[in-house]
Amino acid sequence: MPDPLLTLEGVHTHIGRYHILQGVDFDVPRGSFTVLLGRNGAGKTTTLRTIMGLWKASQGKIRFAGEDVTVRPTPDIAAAGIAYIPENMSVFSGLTVRENLILAARAGKIDSARLEWIFSLFPAMQRFFGAAAGTLSGGQKQMLAIARALIEPRDLILVDEPTKGLAPAIVANMIKAFREVKNAGATVLLVEQNFMAAKMLGDAVAVMDDGRIVHRGAMAELAADHALQHRLLGLHMDAHQ
Amino acid sequence: MLARILSGDRPRSPILTATLLVILFALAFAPFLFSGAQPLNVAAKICVFILLVASYDLLLGYTGIVSFAHTMFFGIGGYGAAIALSRLGPSWSALALGILIAIAVAGALALVIGLFSLRVRAIFFAMITLAVATAFLVLASQLSGFTGGEDGLNYSVPEVLRPSFRLFEQPIVGTAVNGRVVTYYIVFLAALAGFLLLLRVVNSPFGSVLQAIRENEFRAEALGYPVVVYRSIASVVSAMMAALAGVLLALWLRYTGPDTTLSFSIMIDVLLMVVIGGMGTLYGAAIGATLMIIAENYLPALMGKLGAAAAGIPLVSSFLSADRWLLWLGILFILSVYFFPTGIVGKLRTHWQERRNGTAKKRNGARTGEAV
């Protein structure tokens, strides 16, 4: 088992008077594609936002590459090498696609070889590279949101439900792109509701319920155990055929 | 070359381009195009307010910060030049010292306000700036030994800027190039330089970060940009530019008082100019400032003429009376917000974009038809 790049130990998060994360423990091995599953409201998005420091953990420890990042400000966490792709096609609509990408490149300019690689993942992006991000379709916005996280090498990429609300053809394209990212050796923590997509991409899996991790293991084991899927996720046989 | 001067930010609408060229031409040649003191006074005020409104748009339109302290920085600029010239005498060195101190004080104050207040929610920041600006206004009125109090300060300017000075013996195109004309060109060129500098700022990578923060500050933070630092820098740049605009007004009027620089009505005017012109478009500052200042200066006279023409009609004549000009200005503002919710510049750009898209669609449709 590779050493963990990210470790969460007993992480609690309060938002106002709500106690959302209630002792989250799991780790993301270096070079792995870990999927965080769970029903709506289980605390998956809160986990990603807590890792990024957008909501502060009220208790517990978050270690990234051996360093405690629990109380670090968000920009410092991003600068340490974590990229975050929030849900809902999060692009800056007033800026062009190119400006969105430059914004994510910490050097202030885009590496041409990296851009070519992104174009190979999303060939359609070449067509709308100069367009305002606000004028793009949902699928195009999601491509841009992912491209922004890939525009330079990052140690860890956090992805929140990238396939949500997208047409099946675009989801297939998205899965293909993530496979390429995985093959390139990136470490990814993916929150996903689409079990088919999760199954195709994940090496490891953690399942959340009511703000806690209720299952950890290899994705292959969960994919093969339909009874476990039914118990943890409420999935029936026909849901993932 | 032109694209470089405009930092790649073209007007993106033929009507807007033509309007901006007309404004630029009229301001560049105002002393030679219009006779009398009032038109030159209006042109100088337009130059000053274009810079002031553009600097406020950097805050409101590009960064999403609502501040009511902008006229305070405008006032700091005005009082900086006024106090230096009245205390140290009408020399260039006194003026330069006044400008440097005013701009430095404005920048430092904006930094302090920003670092202490930009972490709080937008409405609280707006309230803090309102409180600071009100305190500054009271201070300027009370410290009469230093600021001239309610009466303000009258002072002399360097000899080259006085009306008695003649740059050339003979008039040029029928206009005597005196110290007022020299002052006007200093105001015009400084305002133009400041505007182009702001255009450079908003179209730089720094400007992109500001726009990203305006859209979603959490997302910008997650990309690694410390929001408070960027907002504070934007506040400092904006305050320094407002102070420069204050210096220019002080040079032009040779008088600085609370009513000309610090009053809340100026803050409201600046807000209206940004909204009418179009937030988040510096060209909107030029359009908004020009329209508002022309309306403020010429609407009363126009209303007077219309009122006199309609003297026989009972209700209409009283509505068209010169005293009612503020009512008509209000109506014009409501109409402009109703018909141009994204401001005049936003509307013109959208209209042109839609027209181009429509033409492209038609062309594509015709091609499809040919292929079939």
Image (cartoon, rainbow, N blue to C red):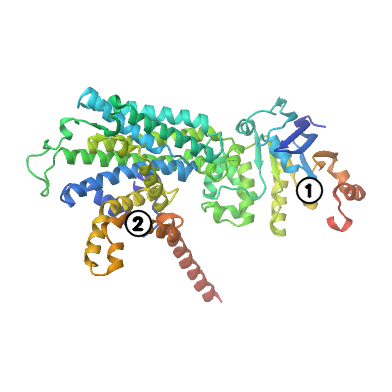
Asked which quadrant contains residue B146, the reply is top left
Mark seen at residue B327:
2
Q: Residues within 10 Å of mark 1 (few under 14, many from 20)?
A: many
Q: Which structural element holds mark 2?
A: helix
Q: Which structural element holds mark 1?
A: helix
Residue A54 visible = yes
Give the amino acid type for the residue marked by disc 1 in the picture: Ala
Q: What is the chain letter for disc 1?
A: A
Query: Is the residue B145 above or below the residue A75 in the image?
Result: above
Nearer the observer, B131 or A134: B131
Q: Position of residue B273 (x, y in %)?
A: 38, 49
Nearer the observer, B52 or A93: B52
**Looking at the image, which residue sits at the far right?**
A227
Q: What is the chain letter for disc 2?
A: B
- Horizontal side, residue B130 vs residue A218: left or right: left
Give the residue at x 42% y 27%. B108
